[in-house]
Image: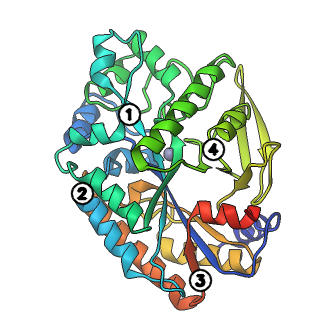
Amino acid sequence: MRIKKSIVRNLSNLPGWRTNQKIVVLESDDWGAIRMSSKEAYDRLFNLGIKPLNKDEERYLKNDSLASESDLTNLFEVLHSVKDGSGKPAVFTVVAVVANPDFGKIKDAANKEYFYEPFNVTLERYPQHANSFELWKQGIREKIFLPQFHGREHLNVHSWLKALQLNNPDTRSAFEEQVYGISPRDPINRISYQAAFDIIDVGEIEYQKTVITEGLDLFEQLFGYRSTFFVPTNGPFNNQLEKTLHEGGIKFIGTSKIQKEPMGNEKYKRNFRYIGQKNKFGQTYLTRNCFFEPSSHLKNDWVDSCMNEIKIAFNWNKPAVISSHRVNYTGFLNLTNREKGLRQLKTLLKSIINRWPDATFITSEELGFIISGK
Ligand SMILES: [Zn+2]
């Protein structure tokens, strides 16, 4: 690690809650969202000129999809294979959306209205996914794959529907492939379709409150318990939504250390956040301090860099909260991607336990309860 980067990484661990325990939390985002519907869809969109903007978008569009049955069973095998000091297996906090657009109904309504479907209904249309939802429930029972709330869908409904109504060509072509998570070449505004809680106008916040309320209720219907931990898709969200989250049962909020709060009219407020910080509703903020993205080319040794970040966290008596997106573990579009991701995950988990035999694997929710003393 370069010296400047190392200093920043050390300093960023200074503020907030501390512990002598060696706590490891694995937070994995984006589960339940479509991203790319098939390899063929990617190729057809690519041939139409709808291409990733950069290497990072490329890794998502080429590799990230709803997890197939074998994606889930292979991941579960790795999580079970490494046990912590108390004999518990590794556990993913699965930061999940619970719905996707209902493309058929939206089309029938001539894009005038938005409809969504629970993600387990989306799974039924996929070729290697018929039993995927049952596997999610198995992961919950085995306490290795525990969903929390990322939003209702990984989609800014307002901007996307507007682009469809304006007949934006790239948005429309992606729609035909049952895909929404692209960056159109000729966007109607600067909002990312992936950022569900970004806004152009403050008036959109009222709709976003219903997105949260309905999403949290659907979450409970699907998984049989209420979510307590929320990570907003892509980060930005207006803090008026915290009250809605609180009323919906959210006790812990995952944010970046600098939270970007959209205020409308292209204005953003930057709020400084640290682990254990509380808001006026008594909700506790949880921040991540380690990163593991083996499908990214940004680093060539993700195990080594993540181990170093964990070491720094422990040196400052902080829990290691590792950010690792679903894209690293899906092989439905590209099997090699999954094999590489899981191999490195296994190495990382084993390295953690070898180096710190007293480390414990817990979920974000458990960490939240430890921090808030409840
Ligand atoms: Zn996400």
Instruction: Tell me: 31 left or right of 258.
Output: left
Q: Nearer the viewer, residue 41 or 113?
A: 113
For marks 4 and 1, the one nearer the N-term is: 1
Marks 3 and 2 sit apart, C-alpha to C-alpha, by 30 Å
Residue 69, disc: 2
Rendering coords of residue 236 (x, y %): 64, 37
Marks 2 and 1 sit apart, C-alpha to C-alpha, by 19 Å
Ligand 1 closer than 8 Å to label 3 CB:
no
For marks 2 and 1, the one nearer the N-term is: 2
**What residue does disc 4 label?**
249
Q: Amino acid at mark 1?
A: Asn
Q: Secondary structure at mark 4?
A: loop
**What residue does disc 3 label?**
359
Rendering coords of residue 328 (x, y %): 40, 60
Instruction: Tell me: 373 left or right of 334.
Output: right
Res. 343 in view: no
For marks 1 and 3, the one nearer the N-term is: 1
